[in-house]
Amino acid sequence: MHAQAPPPAPAAVLLPPAIVLPADLELKPGSLVTQDFDREQFDLKPPQGVRPVPVPVAGRIWRFIVRAAGRPMGAFALLERLLPALEQGGWTLEWRERAVAKRDLGERQYWLKASAGTSGELKLVLAEKGDPRIFDLPLPGLKPELPKGTEDFPYLPPWPGAKLQASNTSRSPVDVKFPDGTEHIMMVNFLDKEYSLAKPPADYEFLVVYREALERAGWTLEGTLRGGVTQVQATYIRRGRDLRATLRLLGDAMGISVADVGAQMAAEAPATQPAAKQP
C-alpha cells in the first residue's frame, strides 16, 4: 500500500518586483498581509507652512515589516539603508523625511511609505494603483423570486467564494409609498442569508464593488456604513418590483437581507390599512 503524497504547500505571498530590499534587510516572517483592493493615503511634502498634501491610492496593497538581516539596527539606521536602495532601484523619494516614495514601472504605478515600528523594525505599506474588480448583478425578474434556504438570491449573489451558512427570516418596518401616493410605515418580512468568506475583501473593496454593481443594475443606494460592520443599503423600485436590500461585511462573514415589499403589499392589499406615516 503506497502512502499518499502530502498536499502541496500553499504558494508563498511575495512582494512585487517593483521593490527589492537591500541584502542586509529582510522581510519579517509572517508579517506580510495583502489585500486585492484597498485604499491607502500617502502624504506629499508641502511648501513651508502648508499642510501635507494627501494622495489617496486605491489598488492592491501590501503591508509588511522589514528588519535587519544580521546585527540589529535601529529604525533610523534601517531607513538609512532602505532609502538609498529605493532610489537605486528606480524609486523617486516624494518626501524623504516621511519615507514616501513613488515608482512608475511601465504602465504600473507604485507608492510606498515607511514608519518606525517596534525596536529595530520598519512598518511598510506598498500600493499598486489599480481598479476594483467588476461584479455584474443580474436584473431582478418581472415576478417575485423566492429562493429556498439552500439557494442564493438570484439578483444579489454573495462575494465570490462565499459559502452559505444559514437562511432565516426577520421583520422590520420600512417606508412604503402606495399607489394612491400616500406613504406609510409597513412591517415587512426580510429573508436573511449568512455566508462565510474564505478570503474576505477589505471593507473598502466590499463597499466599492457592491456600490458600483448595484448602481449598474438599476438599484438606488440608500446609504453605506464603514466601521465595526461594513454595510450597504439599496432599493430596487423598477419594472414593477419593490425590493429593499442590506449587505453587510463582518470580518470573515457577510450577510444579505432582502424584503420583497412589492410582493408583500400585493398579498396584504385586502388587509387593514397600515398606520399613516407621521410628519
Image (spheres, rainbow, N blue to C red):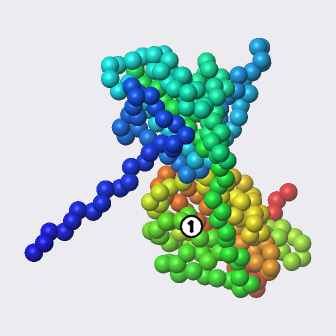
Residue 44 at x, y percent in the picture:
70, 26
Q: Quadrant of residue 158?
A: bottom right
Residue name at image x 65 percent, y 23 percent: 95
Q: Is residue 116 visible?
A: no
Asked if residue 83 lies left or right of residue 211, the reply is: left
Kind of residue indicated by mark 1: Pro
Q: Which residue is mark 1?
A: 158
At horizontal 80% and vertical 80% (from top left) the residue drawn is 240
Q: Quadrant of the C terminus?
A: bottom right
Above or below residue 243? Residue 227 is above
Q: Nearer the viewer, residue 273 or 175?
A: 175
Which residue is located at x 47 percent, y 60 percent? 197
Question: Which percent across, then down, holds residue 172?
Answer: 64, 65
Could you tell me if residue 47 is visible in this image? yes
Q: Count the marks: how many?
A: 1
Residue at 74 percent across and 27 percent down: it is 53
Label 1: how many residues lie within 10 Å, few (<14), some (14-19) or many (20+)? many
